Amino acid sequence: MTAIPQDLDLNLDDIEFSVLPSGLHLIDRDVVYFTKDGQHGVCIFRRRKTQEQGQRGFRLSSFGVLLARSRRPRPWRHTAALKDLLTVIYNQSEEAGLVQPTESQWEPARAFFEERKIRRVDTSEWNGWNQDLSDPTESSSHPTLHLSHLLRILGPSSLTIYRHVLGRRRILIYTQPPVEAACILCYAAADMCYEVQSSTPGRTRDPLSVLGMVTLSDMRRLGSESGWIACTTDAIFLEKPSCYDLLIDLTHSGPRPVFYVSKPVVPPPPRGQTHRLSLTRFAWSDIKLWNELDEILQLGHDHCCSENDNEPLAPTTLPRLGVAWADMWRVYEDVCVVCAGVWMGLGWRPGATTSGRGAISLEGDDDFGLSVSGNTLTREGPYVRNLGMGIEGRPSGSTTTMRRSSAMSWSSGRATVVGASSVDELGSSKTQQGLSSSREEDGGVADEERADRQLRTTLTLLQTLHAHTAFQLAVLASFLPPPQSPSSSTVYLYPKDMVRFELAPLSSSDAKYLEWLAQEYAVDTQIVIKRGWRDLVGALLGYT
């Protein structure tokens, strides 16, 4: 280890547990994102063969940087440079026949640090996603650009993460090495609500904290802090549900990761665990928002991740047996979507008319339809999705022409897609142009078009999520007393009021989600949700 200069006030105790998490000895290389006392960092892991006695055939090392505190830390900016630097240092060491690099061979690392050494504290304001994602220095490394891939892999269950992020809950992702994909998932998930949480007054002005990789040494910190998302490779966390609110198990052998919520044991036992894990899935009220996002994903046709990448999230790595289970799971999700459409067609959604009750009315255009002119979806013949297509991770290759309705042309101000006339051009004409040009021009032009398509898709997804979040917070604000009222007051919400939030009045998970919103964004106001049997029966019968 290199000595730390005395002029740097850094406490690096136990940092080796974060940069060398459990199980990393099984792979050759990886990228680990972590935090230390509020400072974000990133390191490059390498496993090299050695004949040294006591090393068990391999030498493990992590080389990285720790960033100064700032409002918007971006450790991914240094990933590519760190990889190149570590390769140069170790190549020189191997050519010299040395086990470890000498002091002179570490000189490029010192120069790397001096070039990037903090000169002043970064106090600049965040200027929106269009500028954040369009930065050429991080065009290919920004985790949020993987948002479309994340949504396709997780499907409607990704909105379970969205709810917990917006409610500032504690989210833990359990994975196995390599861990880079899980770390990227942490940043991408937190960014789904970053714009709202950084600009909307609430109990906390700071966005959800991204902790990156955590280990057993962080268990006490996880139990005391609130509002974070992290990942771990330590299975012992599965037996400590009191440390988090949502657990995402990426090691599940099925076609999708499994989601668990932590619930208190009632009555609390005198000894043992006070919380237990309960399996959870997406809520029916998420279907409308998911249909919006899924339509954008079908239009985007971007491939942010290589099919050959060794990622724990990639559905292409599933065994053949998993294909059958994937088909069964897709049937289950489709049945839930249809049932939700029936349920909402009975008048549970605001603005439903009497003539529309009893009809199956899903949001968006039908997947199976005749070729009709106008703002409708057209397909050439019937279409059945296979594994790795659609929300499973890869878009369909059939001819699709879709125009966005006005309801999906939301603008979140700073997140507006500049220079994009409409999303339908992204999915139809530009995709066809990209396919034809890739045959005539070199691969660089195709890669540039793919990156531009991926950027536009990500901006549109963030725009849609922000519009939905702003809508629900605006509804919440309509129930709050005016600012001139007493400092503390109590507001009662009934099941009929949940419909205004586009939530299901009979859903306990929707009620819990609404409680999170009230706790976080209803400043100086106590929100009480009445869900007695009389209230529920009244909502069921349509009484006001």
Image (cartoon, grey):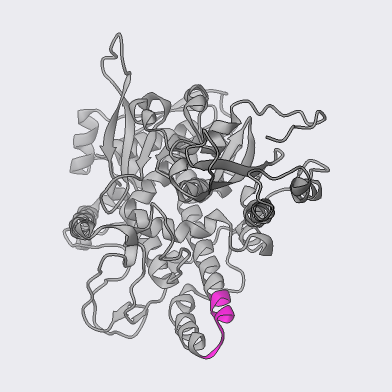
Q: Residue furthest top?
A: 270
Where is residue 27 shown, x and y percent of the image? Answer: 45, 48
Q: Quadrant of the N terminus?
A: top right
Q: Is residue 340 above or below residue 218?
A: below
The residue located at (33%, 82%) in the rendering is 399
Where is residue 458 shown, x and y percent of the image? Answer: 51, 62
Confirm whether residue 365 shows in the render: yes
Q: Is 23 or 287 nearer to us in this picture?
A: 23
Instruction: Read off the magenta span.
Output: 440-449
Confirm whether residue 203 shows in the render: no
The residue located at (41%, 30%) in the rendering is 244
Q: Is residue 3 above or below residue 396?
A: above
Is 334 displayed left or right of 97 in the figure? left
Is 384 displayed left or right of 162 in the figure? left
Does the stretch in magenta take in 14? no
| Residue 398 quadrant | bottom left
Where is residue 517 shown, x and y percent of the image? Answer: 45, 37
